[in-house]
Image: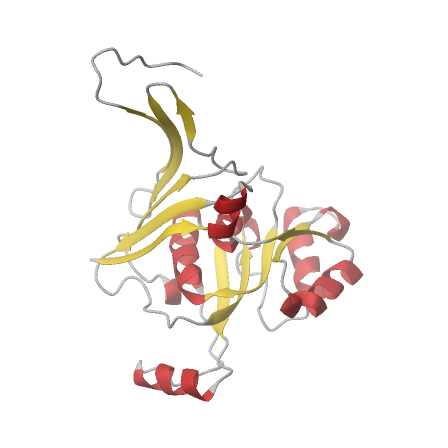
Amino acid sequence: VDIAVDPLEGTNLCATGSANAITVLAASERGGLLHAPDCYMEKLVVGPSCKGKVSLDAPVKDNLQAIAKALDRDVEDLVVIVLDRPRHEKLVDDIRTAGARIKLIGDGDLSAGIAAAVIGTGVHAVMGTGGAPEGVITAAAMRCLNGEIQARLVIDTPDLEARIAKMGISDKKKIYRTEDLAPGKHIIFAATGVTEGSLMKGVRFFGEGTRTSSIVMTLETGAVRFVESIHLEKRPDVKVRFF
């Protein structure tokens, strides 16, 4: 079995009490998840309606127009999530010039990618550069949600070039598709909210325990489950509350 895990995606979000910190795990049969190097990765994430209609190499304006057309709306109605980093200054300018709206986030592009593939979250795409391991976990979620991620490793130092060469990666410019990052046939994806988010509530504490919100997806069955759990402390007078 291959396992990709992020014990706390959005450490800074959790530390500051900000939204969308999650704990997440993806699993597959051996070889079903790409062993990505610990480096940055260019990413473009869209939902099922836009699958196959965008390209990581296309200009931002063209991608936004393609997304708008697929969703039968204007570019001005689109919301694109981008990590708030200096490296994304040009990307932000390009999105604004095209007319779309931007939601800048401090951390948590994985949860943002999941939101882009779920109707009703108000997120239509995720663009920009983030962690490669998180890209693999996002791809596992996209396989289950029928969304799409396109990605390319950012190889910008000699040390990193040597490291990826040892891993057998020869094409530095390769665009990884969803099935390249998570090719498995038996993928399971699970995430639990740590702080309040667009898809899941955060951990809630009450006198006798805690309550959590989770999402569990399996590729083979096509099931997407939203799970509410109450974790009780082992005391004889414990009470379950509905809220």
Residue in the image at 31% along x and 85% along y = 166
Task: Using the rendered view, name the quadrant where residue 198 is placed.
Answer: top right
Front in this rendered view, residue 140 or 10: 10
Image quadrant in which the N terminus is located: bottom left
Residue 14 placement (x, y as % from top left) = 48, 44
Q: Is residue 197 visible?
A: yes
- Is 6 above or below relative to 61? above
Residue 190 placement (x, y as % from top left) = 34, 44
Left or right side of 168 for 152: right
Task: Using the rendered view, name the quadrant where residue 29 is placed.
Answer: bottom left
Left or right side of 95 for 122: left
Image quadrant in which the C terminus is located: top left
- Is 212 above or below relative to 151? above
Residue 97 placement (x, y as % from top left) = 79, 62
Task: Using the rendered view, name the quadrant where residue 55 is placed.
Answer: bottom right
Q: Is residue 10 visible?
A: no
- Is 169 above or below relative to 96? below
Residue 49 placement (x, y as % from top left) = 56, 49
Left or right side of 94 for 238: left
Residue in the image at 36% along x and 26% along y = 210
Front in this rendered view, residue 197 or 186: 197
Q: How is the image coloured?
A: secondary structure
Picture mark count: 0
Residue in the image at 40% along x and 63% along y = 133
